[in-house]
Image (spheres, rainbow, N blue to C red):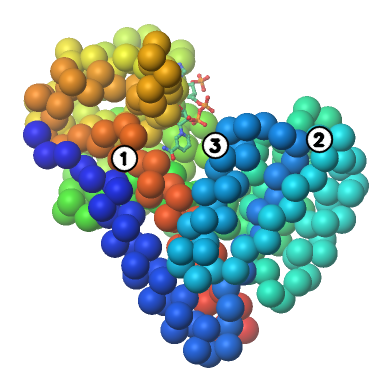
Amino acid sequence: MNLIDGKAVAAQCKAEIREKVAALKEQGINPGLAVILVGDNPASRVYVTNKEKDCAECGIYSEEYKLPENISQQELLDLIGVLNENPAIHGILVQLPLPKHLSEDLVIGSIRPDKDVDAFHSYNVGKIMQGDYQFLPCTPAGVMKLLDAYNIDPAGKHCVVVGRSNIVGKPMAMLLLHRNGTVTICHSRTPNLAEMTRQADILVSAVGKRELITADMVKPGAVVIDVAMNRNDAGKLCGDVCFDEVKDIASYITPVPGGVGPMTRVMLLENTLTAAQAAAKK
Ligand code: NAP
């Protein structure tokens, strides 16, 4: 078994981004990210703090907008409208989930596609389908970087993605397809999950159910990527995969924590850099 070290790969990516940011600053462009947090969800609060810290480490300017839980849809759209026009801001990220009275579709749809560093806007989703994109959603993009870092080529492999969310499962499947994998997508209505996962040369699990993927569900020698972030009974972070039993069967495996998570964080920085580089060319 080879452990896929997301922390190490992310640190290397960060160092490269830091250099590129410095080069851009020499041309007079200071990459900037605006992060909008509505309400006081503790998990979202932690994510936003981490994003600011990551930006600071790479020399990216960041602004945080902490908005009250009861903000109106129009007020939020107005703020995004202002940020859309602000030349110092290259990326806009609205931390999800939003309070129930706000429409996520409307809010994400109001972000200018060239500043949509989460790549959730329908325009960017469509571009990803076509394989002609500026941004990729951070988690699937991070998984692809990890595969590349370990010279794991999806071409000709059977790639099984468990989970079909818009932010992870579906784009993940699309990226593996663009890289010439033969892709199967599984979900909660897949009748015999183990039968599908056992066929995987590359298995990506993005469900959010601890101990979902057991050793008998993994083909010997498979690459196993665990996207999920769950808590075990002791409150410790864990993924979908029974790591201790699967690690002896897999050829490569990501740990949780320390696998996909750090890559997701670093891809936001990369997308912000990409947006700033594109703005510099205009
Ligand atoms: P989500 O929107 O809840 O989607 C979960 C998917 O899993 C759905 O497509 C669902 O199927 C499927 N599913 C549920 N139970 C299943 C089962 N028993 N067998 C097969 N499929 C099943 O979650 P998400 O936002 O994609 O996130 C997935 C996990 O990744 C979560 O643990 C989340 O915390 C984690 N995550 C991690 C990162 C990171 O940086 N590491 C980033 C994002 C998310 P249906 O569509 O049929 O309901």
CA–CA distance in space, label 1 to label 3: 23 Å
- Give neighbour class at mark 2: few <14, some 14-19, many 20+ (Cα, 10 Å): some
**x, y percentage for residue 91?**
62, 63
Q: Is residue 121 above or below residue 276?
A: above
Q: Residue at x 83, y 51 (%)?
A: 77
Residue 72 figure quarter = top right
Q: What residue is disc 3 on?
A: 166
Sequence-wise first label, 2 or 3: 2
Q: Quarter holding the N terminus?
A: top left
Do the residues bearing badges 1 and 2 touch, measured as CB atoms within 8 Å? no
Q: Amino acid at mark 2?
A: Glu
Q: Helix, strand, or loop for circle 1? A: loop
Report if the beta carbon of the residue with label 3 is closer than 8 angstroms to ligand 1. yes
Q: What residue is disc 2 on?
A: 69
Q: Amino acid at mark 1?
A: Gly
Residue 191 figure quarter = top left
Q: What residue is disc 1 on?
A: 258
**x, y percentage for residue 174?**
41, 44
CA–CA distance in space, label 2 to label 3: 25 Å
Instruction: Confirm whether residue 229 shows in the render.
Output: yes
Sequence-wise first label, 1 or 3: 3
Residue 200 vs residue 59, the one in the foreground: 59
Q: Amino acid at mark 3?
A: Asn
Q: Helix, strand, or loop for circle 2? A: loop
**x, y percentage for residue 224?**
23, 32
